[in-house]
Image (spheres, rainbow, N blue to C red):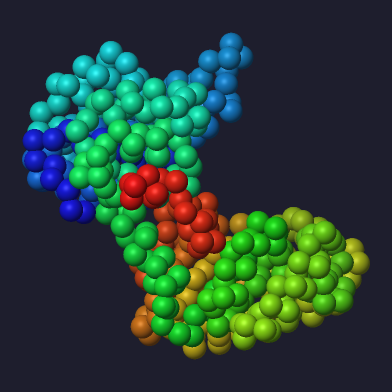
C-alpha cells in the first residue's frame, strides 16, 4: 500500500459483517482480524482511522413500524470487540453521516479510531447514492477499500465514494491486495497442473465459473448436487437427486468444450445416497449413474473420494469452490472432509491452494485446516465473480 497517511484522516471501508449471538456478542471475528493490518498501518504511520461497514440486511427485515432494528444490527458490539483486539479505545458514533458523525470525525487526533454506524441503515447505501457518498468522503482526506467481501457491490461506501478522492488519495488495503494477488496465481499463468474443485447445488450458479475454468484448468473435479445434472445429461439414472432439467444441454456442451480444450472433467463415480433429505435418513453407496428412483445423492462415494484425492495430490495449483455434498449433515460430510484433507496435504507438499466460497471456507474452518492451505478468501460472491472474469465495481473504482 503506497499511500501517505501521516497527519491524515483515513476513511476505511472494512467488512465487519460478522455473526452476533442473541446477546449481541461477536461469535466469529475472522473478518475483523483480517482488517487489522490495514488499520494498524494507518495508526503506526501517524494517521487517524474512520471505519465504515455494513452488518446484515436491516432494510430487508424492518420492524412493524417500518423502521430498521437499530439494536439488532448496530455495529456497537463490533466496536467493543475491535477495541479488545487492538488494545485501545474505538470510538463509536450512532449514525453513518450527519452532525454527530462529522463532529466525531473532525475531533479525531492522530492514532484515534472511529467506527461509524451500519452503512445499510441508510437506503442510499445500496443505491450507490452520490450525495450520501459525498457526505462520507467529506469525513476524511484519504479513502481505503479493504472490504473484499463487498467489492462486487456497487454501493455508496464501496464504489461511489471513491470518485470523490484523487488517485493519490485512494488505495486498496492489505486484505484486498492479498485477495487480488492470490487469485492472480490461479487466473494468470498458474503452475501446472491446475485443478479446480467445484461443488455446490446448481450448475446454473456456476456456469460462468465453469466456462472460465475450461480455458484454464487441466482437471475439473465436480461434486455436490450439480454433479447429477451432468450425470443425467450423460444418460445416467439419478433418482430424486437434484437435477436442473433445463440445464442438461448446457451440461453436455460444457463436457464437449472440455474435450476440445483438453480439460479433464471428473464426475463422481459413486455416491452416498439417502431415501430422504435428512441427517437420519437411510443411506447406501451406489454407482452415481444408477441411483434408485426414490433415493437421492447427497455426497460423493468412497471410489470418487479416492479418485479426487489422487488428482489433488498430483496438482501444483488448486482452486476449491463449493462442497462435495451436504456437509452440514455429518452423515454426508465425508466427501467434503476428504477433499479438504487432500488439499491440505497437497499444500504441505508445495502446491498453491486457494479456497473461496462460503461453504468450502466453512468446511476448511470447521476442520481447523485454514492454516494448512495457501489462502482462504474472505469473499464468497466477490471471489466467485473475480474468478468468473468479471471486473468488480469496488476494485475498478480504486483503479480509475
Q: Which is nearer the eye, 306 or 209?
A: 209
Left/right placement of residue 227 relative to residue 65 reads right
Horizontal and vertical percent position of residue 103: 21, 17
Residue 207 in view: yes
* Residue at x 26% of width, y 25% of height: 138
Left/right placement of residue 300 relative to residue 65 reads right
- Does residue 32 sit above or below 2 in this rendering? above
* Residue at x 32% of width, y 16% of height: 98
- Does residue 267 sit above or below 332 in this rendering? below
Left/right placement of residue 13 relative to residue 241 reads left
- Quick one: quadrant of the N terminus? bottom left
* Residue at x 47% of width, y 75% of height: 318
Residue 111 in view: no
Horizontal and vertical percent position of residue 335: 62, 72
Instruction: Indicate the quadrant where residue 11 lies.
Output: top left
- Does residue 78 sit above or below 292 in this rendering? above
Q: Which is nearer the eye, 110 or 138?
A: 138
Horizontal and vertical percent position of residue 343: 47, 76
Instruction: Indicate the quadrant where residue 179 lies.
Output: bottom left
- Does residue 219 sit above or below 101 in this rendering? below
Horizontal and vertical percent position of residue 290: 85, 77
* Residue at x 22% of width, y 30% of height: 140
Amino acid at each position: 500500500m503506497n499511500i501517505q497517511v501521516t497527519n491524515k484522516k483515513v476513511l476505511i471501508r472494512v467488512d465487519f459483517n460478522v455473526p452476533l449471538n442473541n446477546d449481541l456478542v461477536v461469535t466469529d471475528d475472522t473478518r475483523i482480524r483480517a482488517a487489522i493490518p490495514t488499520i494498524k498501518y494507518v495508526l503506526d504511520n501517524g494517521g487517524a482511522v474512520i471505519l465504515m461497514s455494513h452488518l446484515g440486511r436491516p432494510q430487508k427485515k424492518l420492524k412493524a413500524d417500518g423502521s430498521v432494528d437499530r439494536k439488532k444490527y448496530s455495529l456497537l458490539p463490533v466496536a467493543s470487540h475491535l477495541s479488545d483486539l487492538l488494545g485501545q479505545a474505538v470510538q463509536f458514533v450512532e449514525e453513518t453521516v450527519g452532525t454527530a458523525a462529522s463532529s466525531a470525525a473532525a475531533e479525531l487526533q492522530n492514532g484515534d479510531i472511529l467506527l461509524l454506524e451500519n452503512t445499510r441503515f441508510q437506503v442510499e447505501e445500496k443505491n450507490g447514492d452520490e450525495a450520501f457518498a459525498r457526505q462520507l468522503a467529506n469525513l476524511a482526506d484519504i479513502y481505503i477499500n479493504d472490504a473484499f467481501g463487498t467489492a462486487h457491490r456497487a454501493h455508496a461506501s464501496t464504489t461511489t465514494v471513491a470518485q470523490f478522492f484523487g488517485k493519490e488519495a485512494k488505495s486498496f488495503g492489505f486484505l484486498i491486495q492479498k485477495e487480488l494477488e492470490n487469485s492472480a496465481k490461479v487466473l494468470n499463468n498458474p503452475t501446472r497442473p491446475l485443478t479446480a474443485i467445484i461443488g455446490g447445488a446448481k450448475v446454473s450458479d456456476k456456469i460462468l465459473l465453469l466456462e472460465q475454468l475450461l480455458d484454464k484448468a487441466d482437471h475439473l473435479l465436480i461434486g455436490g448436487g450439480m454433479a447429477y445434472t451432468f450425470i443425467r445429461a450423460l444418460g445416467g439414472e439419478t433418482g430424486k437427486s437434484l437435477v436442473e432439467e433445463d440445464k442438461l444441454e448446457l451440461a453436455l456442451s460444457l463436457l464437449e468444450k472440455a474435450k476440445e480444450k483438453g480439460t479433464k472433467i471428473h464426475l463422481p463415480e459413486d455416491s452416498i445416497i439417502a431415501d430422504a433429505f435428512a441427517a437420519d435418513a437411510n443411506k447406501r453407496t451406489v454407482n452415481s449413474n444408477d441411483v434408485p428412483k426414490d433415493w437421492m445423492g447427497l455426497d460423493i462415494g468412497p471410489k470418487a473420494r479416492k479418485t479426487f484425492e489422487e488428482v489433488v495430490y498430483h496438482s501444483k495449483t488448486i482452486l476449491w469452490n463449493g462442497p462435495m455434498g451436504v456437509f452440514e449433515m455429518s452423515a454426508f460430510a465425508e466427501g467434503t472432509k476428504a477433499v479438504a484433507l487432500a488439499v491440505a496435504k497437497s499444500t504441505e507438499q508445495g502446491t498453491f491452494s486457494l479456497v473461496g466460497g462460503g461453504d468450502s471456507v466453512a468446511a476448511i474452518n470447521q476442520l481447523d485446516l485454514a492454516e494448512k492451505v495457501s489462502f482462504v478468501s474472505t469473499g464468497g460472491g466477490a471471489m466467485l465473480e473475480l474468478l468468473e472474469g468479471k471486473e468488480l465495481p469496488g476494485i475498478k473504482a480504486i483503479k480509475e
